Image: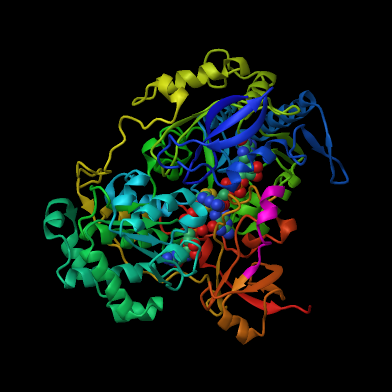
Amino acid sequence: MKEHITVCPRNCYSTCTFRVFTEDGRVKRILPYEGNLATPEGPCIKGLSYLEREYSPERIIYPLRRQPDGTFSRIGTEEALDIISGKLLEAREKYGPHSVLFYKGSGYSGLSNDIAGNFWKLFGGATTTFGNLCWPAGLEAVRLTLGEVKHNVPWDIVSASMIILWGKNSAETNVQEMIHIGRARENGAQVVVIDPRRTPTADKADILLRPRPGTDAALALAMAKVIIDRGLADAEFIRRYVSGFDKFTASLDITPEKAQEITGIPAEDIIRLAVMAGEAKRLTVVAGYGLQRYTNGGQTIRAILSIPIITGMIGKPGCGFNFANLQSYIFDDVKEPLSYYPDTEADKPFRRAISMATFGPDFFALKEPGIEVAWIERGNPVTQLPGSGEVIRAFKSVAFKVVVEQFLTDTAAMADIILPAKGIFEQADVVGSYWNPYAQYKPAVADPPGEVMPESAIYRRLAEKMGMNISSDDAIPAPEGYEGWLKERISHTPGFDPEELMQKPVIPEHNEHPAYGNLKFGTPSGKIELWSDMALKLWGVNPLPAYEPPDDFGEGDLPFRLMTPNIASRIHSQFGNLEVVKSVIEKPAWEISVADARRLGLKSGDSIRVFNSLGEVKGRVKVTSRVRKGSLVFPNGIWLAEGGGVNSLIKPAETDMGHGAAFHNTRVDIEKLPA
Ligand SMILES: Nc1nc2c(c(=O)[nH]1)N[C@H]1C(S)=C(S)[C@@H](COP(=O)(O)OP(=O)(O)OC[C@H]3O[C@@H](n4cnc5c(=O)[nH]c(N)nc54)[C@H](O)[C@@H]3O)O[C@H]1N2
Ligand SMILES: Nc1nc2c(c(=O)[nH]1)N[C@H]1C(S)=C(S)[C@@H](COP(=O)(O)OP(=O)(O)OC[C@H]3O[C@@H](n4cnc5c(=O)[nH]c(N)nc54)[C@H](O)[C@@H]3O)O[C@H]1N2
Ligand SMILES: [Mo]
C-alpha cells in the first residue's frame, strides 16, 4: 500500500491532517498524522467515513438527467455538457449573462475553487450571491475592533489559566480543540462554557452559564462594568493600545442585576465570572459562531471581545480572543472579509449579486433579466438557506438547473442535469484553515469512479464547447495542465517553500504568534477600537459595543426561540446519509425542556407540529434537561426525507453587520399531534 499525507477539505475549524493508504488507485485505510500539532489524534467519525463516502453505492458517478416523470436517468458526459452549453449560450444570447445564477456553497475548500470564478468571468458575468450563512457578523466585529481576524495557534490554549468557551460547542464542532482544552484543564485552567444548552462541551467544563438566546451582549457588558468598577482592568494596556475606553466606560449602564433580568443568569454568578476573568493571569475567550447568527450578532461579538481587551489579554501567549484565524486562509477568497461587501470594485463589471441571507426575497425582486439557468455547486441551498419555502419556489421558477453533486441531496433532486462531483481523494489541491495555522497540500491519490470529473475539468470542457477564449491564459487549465497550474499558483504565494508544502502541512512564514504580538492594529486609529466610527459608517450600528434585544420578526408572542445548532455526526447537510454515521447516531429529534414538556403534556417520542407564520415541520420530541425553558432545538442540515426542513421556519434576515444570516432569532409554537 502507498501512504500519503492529506487533509480534510470540509468547512470545519479543525481541517484535520491524516494519513491515507491506497492500493491500485483505491483508498484502503485512514490513520492519524501526528505532525499537525493542532490535530494530532486523527480525524473524527466524518473523516473516517471517507472510506465509505468515496465508494458509497449512493454516490452519483455519472451525469443524470431528469425525466418528465421526475426520475433521473444516466446520460453520457458529452451529451450532458452539450445540453448545458446550449442552455448557457441561449440564455446569454437572449437575456445577457446575468440571466444565469451561479450559486456556490461551502461544501469544499481549496484553491481550485478559483477556477469557477474564472469561468463565470469569461462567460461575461453572472448573477451570484454575497454575504455568507456562516460567520460574517463575527468576522466583521473582530476586523472593526482589532483590524485583522486572527488568533494564537490552537495548542497555545494549553497555557491559559482561564478559558471561556462563549457559545462554542467544541466537543461537537471542533473536536480537536478539546485535546488542547483538556490539557489546559490538567494544568489547572478553569474552563467556563456560556451556552443556553448544556452541550457535550459543557460536560467537560468547570462552570456553565445558560443565558437566554441572543442576550450575551448584556452579559458581557455587565461583566465589563464589574471589571472596571472593581479596578480589575489593565490600565496601562488600555492607555497604550485601546481607543474609546472612556466613552465605553461611560456607556456601561447594564448592572449585574439588570443583566440578570435580560439574560436570566443570577447577578451573583455574573459578578463571580467577571471577577474571575478580571483576576485571571492568562485569559483566552473562544467565541463560537452560533451566537452571532442573530440580528444583534456583530454587536454581541464586539461586546464579548471587550473583556479580553480591557483585561489586557491581547497579543500574549495563553491569552486572546479566538473567533477565527485567517492567517493560513490565503488561498480561498470565498471567505475573505472583503468579499462580504457587495459589488466591490473588482466585481462590478462582472456580477449582479443578491444576499445569501435573504436569497428568496432578493431572488423574486430581481429586475430584468430574470434567472433562466441556475448552476449550483458545493452547496445544498434547499436545506441550508433560511426561508427555504421561498428558496424552493425560486428554484422551481428557473427553467433549467445544473447541480454538481456527489449525492442526491434535496437540491440535486431539483436539478435538470446533475453532474457528478469529485471526492476528496481525486484531485490535488491546497487547503487553508480558519483555526489551525497550517496551509496544506491535498494530493490526488485515488482514481475517480465512473465518469466523475473535478469542476476544473467540467469548466474546461464547457469553455471549449462554448468557444471561450481560454487559449491565452491559465484561467481554466486543461486536466493535464491542472497540477502545473496549482504549482504555479503556490509558487506565487509569499511565505512558503512550495516543495515543503507538497510534503507536509506548513505554517506560513508570516504566521504571527502570539497573534497581534507586535501590538499594532490595522484599524483606522492603529489601536484596538472599542469605539469604531467604521461600525457606524458601514453598518449603522452604535460605534460602541451595545446590547440590542434580538428582533422577534413580529412573532414575539410565540413561546419558543428556535435554535438550530451543528452536530458531531455531520457537517451541515453532509455525512448523514452514510451507513457508518447512521450506525452511531440517534435520529434527530426536537429537544424541549422538562418544564415546557410538562406544561404541554409532552413526553419523549411524542409527535409534534412546529409552526410559525412561515411554515411548519413535523417530528418527534425529546424531553431533556439540556435545553432551556423557552428554547426549542433541532439540528440544521437534516435532509427533508429524514424529517428536516427546519429552514422553512426561519425568516430570511441579515445580521447587523457582515451580511450574515440571523437564523436564531426565529420564534415558533408547537402543537402535540395524535399518536
Ligand atoms: N461536527 C460538526 N462540526 C462542524 C460543523 C458541523 O456541522 N458539524 N460545521 C462547521 C461550520 S460551517 C461551522 S459554522 C462551525 C460552527 O461551530 P459552532 O460555533 O460551535 O457551532 P454552532 O452549533 O452553530 O453554535 C455553537 C453553540 O452556540 C450556542 N448558541 C446559540 N445561540 C446562542 C446564544 O445566544 N448565546 C450563546 N452563548 N450560545 C448560543 C448553541 O447552543 C451551540 O451550542 O462548526 C464547523 N464544524
Ligand atoms: N437553520 C440553520 N441553517 C444553517 C445554519 C444554521 O446554524 N442553522 N448554518 C449555516 C452554516 S454555518 C453553513 S456553513 C451552511 C452550510 O451549507 P452549505 O454551504 O450548503 O453546505 P453543506 O450543507 O455542507 O453542503 C455542501 C454540499 O456540497 C457537496 N460537495 C462536497 N464536496 C464537493 C465538491 O468537491 N464539489 C461539489 N460540487 N460539491 C461538493 C456535498 O455533497 C454537499 O451536498 O449552512 C447554513 N445553514
Ligand atoms: Mo458554517
In the displayed structure, does residue 160 sit left or right of residue 180?
left
Percent of width and height locating residue 166: 39, 62
Furthest residue in direction right, as rendered: 69
Quarter holding the C terminus? bottom right
Q: Would you say residue 582 sits in the magenta stretch? A: yes
Q: In this view, does 51 lie above or below 391?
A: above
Quarter holding the N terminus? top right
Q: Quadrant of residue 244?
A: bottom left
In the displayed structure, does residue 288 sit left or right of residue 276?
right
**Is residue 358 something one can see in this rendering?**
no
Q: Which of 363 and 580 is in front in this view?
A: 580
Percent of width and height locating residue 224: 25, 67
Q: In which quarter of the image is residue 295?
A: bottom left
Residue drawn at the location 22% of the way across and 65% of the way down: 278
Residue drawn at the location 87% of the way across and 43% of the way down: 68
Q: Is residue 483 above or below residue 180?
A: above
Colouring scheme, one of rainbow, by chain, secondary structure, one colour: rainbow
Percent of width and height locating residue 101: 62, 40
**Is residue 359 something one can see in this rendering?**
yes
Residue drawn at the location 76% of the way across and 42% of the way down: 58
Q: Which of 458 and 320 is in front in this view?
A: 320
Q: Which of 664 and 264 is in front in this view?
A: 264
Residue drawn at the location 42% of the way across and 72% of the way down: 211
Label count reads 0
Q: What stretch is highlighted in magenta?
A: 578-590
Percent of width and height locating residue 367: 60, 47
Q: Would you say residue 643 sits in the magenta stretch? A: no
In the displayed structure, does residue 74 sit left or right of residue 482?
right
Furthest residue in direction top, as rendered: 472
Q: Is residue 609 above or below residue 405?
A: below
